[in-house]
Image: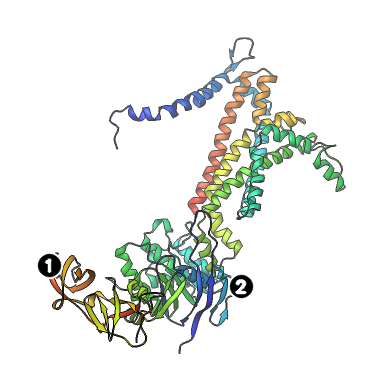
């Protein structure tokens, strides 16, 4: 069992609504740990409390209840500057009047590192991020991607215990996002750093994370590896939030030893089941052509490597995924089948938890 | 975008240009022309060339008035900016109490100069004044600040600071609102304490605000007249004779419109130079950062 670097224990937080501003998301008894050297991604829709969680770890917010520990030390009453954490902000938060060199030097200067050691550390960090040529420029003279790198540089230059990332890619062009995402992953792993990364983008979560924490409405829904989250989501929300195209959710009911969802029948999972359930089927587990129920193609979205198809079967609209440029056309009649072994069954009421093994 | 006819842009600029010409360029021209004549408001004006300027310079009066005005302005601008920024930092907090204090400080700026001057005349009165009584209670000898040639000008500056601080505070408060919270948070995570955050984040971001407050309070203090007219009439021993008051004296007491016009022209050039210098200082400082 690896050491836990950061842990949250029953952390709750409520905000009073301020005039003209939406109140920040509240947290309800959030408990989890980040292992040493792990990259943990917190993902969820806006208002789920993911940024609040990050800010509480950073010390920028104080929890109403519960405790945060870093390296086994309680952070109660410890101000941000004494926590040995570095943060990459969504808007980068670079000091506009300073050059990149001064910005990178700043955290070291504040910690009374000598001039020579500072210069060395800045050169090293700049080389790591390949931003040497930016060092004498101010943020106003840089592109979004360049600012992002300088913000990363400021975080790595003093080798903190924990990195915090608050949606670091959301202000970048889509074309840059993929590249920098890859770089962040490589960088964090090369430094062997512990990192907590907040995003609303499920692709970032899946691609970067050692483990993913899915949050909604201030609660932690599931914390597991990307594969576990994808294949065995704890609730139907987790299932639909991660993965594109979105997982299909079909209304179903228990019928003896089977579950019936529209025209499809699948084996009943073990345990007691409520009368009404939801059946989750990922688009790649919907097969078009061959055996199956009769359906009609409503829409196709060719993307090159794959084509997304919407097909109507017995009054139900299903998203399906096919390879390459699909030969189907809008209005075609087609046979539709689902893979019963890969279908997931959720409670149709309450917290929509996944049922069965 | 190109105008369809060449006169179109001039038509757009017309109203503003018209106002500028009528209320700014023409008066300056009139003053400039008037400064070359000798006129007592009764007999016809007589052309004297540069004699008015020569007379002002010869007595050393011009230099004394200019230095006095610069000294007064320096006191008012530095006092206003320091106190205004200090109060803005102190009162930039939520809550009704702070809102009340902010409003109280600002209310001084809304009061007319005449009322302020009368109020302070009473406060600074050697015998009955609050300040005098306070000094006496502390065991100091009673001083009539306004009657002392060394203390009168600083006393007037104090009144100017008292009135203008509320204005500076409001502008600095607006400047503080524009400091992004994320920059202060980033600085905190970078290890900066409250003082370092102020020095490295807040202060540099307030530079444009400071330039604005400095220029506007400079212009206001240069134009000081009401306080002088009401509180000291330029005395004692001319210790508080500031530029605008000197101009007034030349016209209405000496009936010398030519001299007054010459003073006005010098005043205009001096104010332009000082304000230009001030803006330059702020601009280069911003360029350095």
Marks 2 and 1, the one that precedes in the sequence: 2
Label 1 packing within 10 angstroms: few (<14), some (14-19), many (20+): few
The quadrant the C terminus of chain A occupies is: bottom left
User: In the displayed structure, does residue A249 sit left or right of residue B15?
Assistant: left
Count of numbered circles on the image: 2
Q: Position of residue A187 (x, y in %)?
A: 38, 75
Q: Chain of mark 2?
A: A
Work out whether A178 lies above or below B203. Answer: below
Label 2 packing within 10 angstroms: few (<14), some (14-19), many (20+): few
Identified at 38% across, 74% down, the residue is A349
Work out whether B173 lies above or below B186. Answer: above
Q: Secondary structure at mark 1?
A: loop
Marks 2, 1: nearer the viewer: 1
Front-most of residues A157 and B168: B168
Q: Position of residue A313 (x, y in %)?
A: 19, 71
Instruction: Say which quarter of the image contains residue A200.
Output: bottom left
Is there any visible trace of residue B267 in the rendered image?
yes
Q: Secondary structure at mark 2?
A: loop
Work out whether disc 2 and disc 1 sit on a shared chain.
yes
Is there any visible trace of residue B190 in the rendered image?
no
Front-most of residues B190 and B113: B113
Q: Which residue is mark 1?
A: A332
Work out whether A199 lies above or below A275. Answer: above
The answer to whether marks 2 and 1 mark residues whose Cβ atoms lie closer than 8 Å is no
Query: Marks 2 and 1, how far apart in space?
Result: 65 Å
User: In the displayed structure, does residue B274 sit left or right of residue B97?
Assistant: left
The quadrant the N terminus of chain A occupies is: bottom left
Q: Position of residue A130 (x, y in %)?
A: 37, 69
Q: Which residue is mark 2?
A: A77
């Amino acid at each position: 069992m690896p050491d836990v670097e950061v842990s949250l224990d029953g952390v709750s937080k409520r905000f009073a609504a301020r005039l003209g501003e939406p109140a920040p998301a509240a947290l309800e008894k959030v408990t989890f740990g980040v292992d040493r050297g792990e990259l943990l991604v917190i993902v969820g829709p806006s208002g789920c409390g993911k940024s609040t969680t990050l800010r509480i770890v950073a010390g920028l917010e104080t929890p109403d209840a519960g405790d945060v520990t870093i390296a086994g030390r309680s952070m109660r009453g410890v101000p941000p500057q004494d926590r040995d954490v570095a943060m990459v902000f969504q808007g980068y938060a670079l000091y506009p009047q300073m050059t990149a060199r001064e910005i990178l030097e700043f955290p070291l200067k504040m910690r009374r590192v000598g001039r020579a050691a500072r210069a060395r550390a800045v050169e090293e960090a700049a080389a790591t991020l390949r931003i040497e040529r930016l060092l004498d420029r101010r943020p106003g003279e840089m592109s979004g991607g360049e600012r992002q790198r300088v913000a990363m540089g400021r975080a790595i230059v003093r080798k903190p215990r924990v990195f915090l990332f608050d949606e670091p890619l959301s202000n970048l062009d889509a074309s840059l996002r993929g590249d920098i995402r890859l770089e962040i992953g490589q960088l964090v792993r090369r430094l062997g750093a512990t990192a907590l990364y907040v995003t609303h983008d499920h692709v970032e979560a899946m691609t970067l994370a050692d483990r993913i924490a899915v949050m909604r409405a201030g609660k932690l829904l599931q914390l597991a590896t990307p594969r576990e989250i994808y294949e065995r989501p704890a609730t139907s929300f987790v299932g639909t939030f991660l993965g594109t195209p979105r997982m299909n959710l079909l209304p179903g009911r228990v019928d003896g030893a089977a579950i019936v969802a529209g025209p499809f029948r699948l084996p009943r999972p073990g345990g007691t089941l409520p009368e009404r359930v939801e059946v989750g089927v990922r688009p790649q587990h919907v097969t078009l052509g061959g055996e199956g129920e009769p359906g009609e193609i409503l829409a196709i979205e060719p993307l090159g490597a794959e084509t997304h198809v919407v097909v109507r079967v017995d009054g139900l609209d299903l998203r399906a995924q096919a390879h390459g440029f699909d030969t189907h056309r809008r209005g075609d009649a087609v046979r539709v089948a689902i893979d019963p072994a890969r279908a997931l069954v959720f409670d149709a009421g309450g917290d929509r938890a996944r049922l069965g093994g | 975008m190109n105008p369809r006819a060449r006169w179109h842009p001039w038509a757009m600029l017309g109203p503003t240009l018209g106002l500028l010409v009528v209320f700014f360029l023409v008066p300056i021209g009139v003053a400039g022309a008037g400064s070359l004549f000798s006129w007592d408001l009764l007999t016809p004006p007589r052309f004297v060339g540069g004699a008015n300027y020569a007379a002002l310079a010869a007595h050393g009066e011009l230099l004394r008035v200019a230095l006095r005005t610069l000294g007064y302005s320096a006191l008012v601008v530095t006092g206003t900016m320091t106190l205004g920024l200090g109060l803005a930092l102190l009162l930039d907090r939520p809550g009704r109490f702070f809102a009340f204090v902010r409003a109280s400080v600002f209310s001084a700026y809304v009061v007319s100069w005449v009322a302020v001057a009368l109020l302070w005349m009473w406060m600074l009165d050697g015998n009955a004044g609050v300040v005098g009584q306070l000094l006496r209670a502390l065991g100091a000898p009673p001083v009539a600040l306004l009657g002392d040639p060394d203390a009168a000008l600083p006393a007037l500056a104090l009144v100017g600071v008292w009135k203008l601080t509320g204005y500076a505070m409001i502008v600095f408060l607006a400047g503080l609102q524009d400091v992004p919270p994320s920059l202060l948070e980033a600085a905190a995570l970078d290890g900066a304490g409250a003082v370092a955050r102020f020095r490295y984040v807040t202060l540099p971001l307030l530079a444009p605000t400071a330039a604005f407050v400095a220029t506007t309070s400079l212009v206001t203090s240069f134009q000081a007249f009401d306080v002088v007219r009401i509180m000291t009439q330029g005395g004692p021993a001319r210790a508080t004779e500031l530029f605008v008051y000197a101009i007034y004296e030349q016209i209405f007491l000496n009936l010398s419109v030519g001299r007054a016009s010459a003073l006005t022209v010098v005043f205009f050039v001096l104010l332009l130079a000082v304000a230009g210098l001030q803006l330059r200082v702020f601009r280069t400082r911003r360029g350095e950062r």
